[in-house]
Amino acid sequence: MTDSLFSPVPDPSARQARGAGAAVAEGLATAIHEHRLTPGMKLGEDEVGAAFNVSRTVVRAALQTLAHEQLVSIAPHRGAFVAQPDMREAREVFEARALLEPRTAHSAALRATPADIALLEAHISAEHDALAAGETGRALRLSGQFHLDIARIADQATIAAFIANLVSRSSLVIALYWRRRNAICESNAHHALLRALADGNGPEAEALMKSHLVDLLSLLDLSPGARPARTLAEALGKP
């Protein structure tokens, strides 16, 4: 009796559906991170399906993925919505980042290669280009990617997974509670962090990351913010 009798036969259509679902989830997540999809916006299955030219089955899989990542909330009989973290969750997200990321920055400083430093420099440059173009949402996503790359450089996969989730949820928090939207332009924290990482200075990188995240928390106005209503098609830039 061969192993094939016990092994599932690969289903190309199932693989294709999973790939399509992942692509839709990624597209929606990027739009959320860039604040083109705002907290509280309804994500209708038909509208999402039309925007990405996929079936409702694929859309449901994508929305379930985003719900698991806490970017989307799914309410029985009401559908899916971009998540709206409350004030307590907003504070907890940044406090958790302040606990995890400083030590990760310390570890990254001890492991960073010239190629890693070059990649971080490219992120900062791209972030500045986005700001110069008035694309604050894209700059914010790139800023988050800077933090994710530091976690990757630290080579601590379990902690990096927690940080990735927190950075992702930070996009929602900032969309709701950011006090000064131009504050992202005023911070030199990433440049200072880059210098510490390039110098291999773990204690300095740790201290700078902690200060940076405390500053970000101080820029949150933890009272309900404006939640602009826009259509899904407009937010995704679809005709």
Image: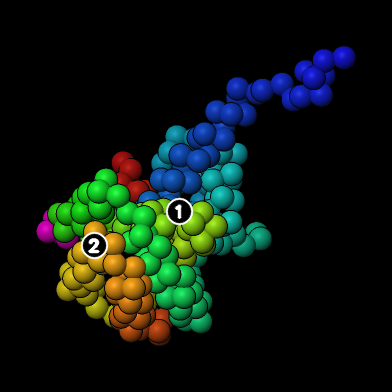
Total label count? Answer: 2
- Image point (45%, 53%), residue name: 155
Q: Secondary structure at mark 1?
A: loop
Task: For residue 58, say whether it is visible.
Answer: yes
- Residue highlighted by disc 1: 155
Q: Nearer the viewer, residue 178 or 57?
A: 178
Q: Position of residue 7 (x, y in %)?
A: 76, 24
Q: Looking at the image, is 21 positioned above or below residue 7?
A: below
Q: Looking at the image, is 49 positioned above or below residue 193?
A: above
Q: Position of residue 33 (x, y in %)?
A: 37, 58
- Please tell me how crowded label 1 is: few (under 14), some (14-19), or many (20+) other residues with Cα within 10 Å: some
Residue range (magenta):
131-135
- Image point (62%, 29%), residue name: 14
Kindly indicate the quadrant of the structure image that contains residue 225: bottom left
- Residue highlighted by disc 2: 199
Q: Is residue 127 left or right of residue 203?
A: left
Q: Secondary structure at mark 2?
A: loop
Q: Nearer the viewer, residue 222 or 198?
A: 198
Q: How is the image coloured?
A: rainbow
**Residue 102 falls inside the magenta stretch:** no
Magenta residues, dominant SS class: loop
- Image point (59%, 44%), residue name: 61
Q: Looking at the image, is 16 positioned above or below residue 228?
A: above
- Image point (17%, 73%), residue name: 186
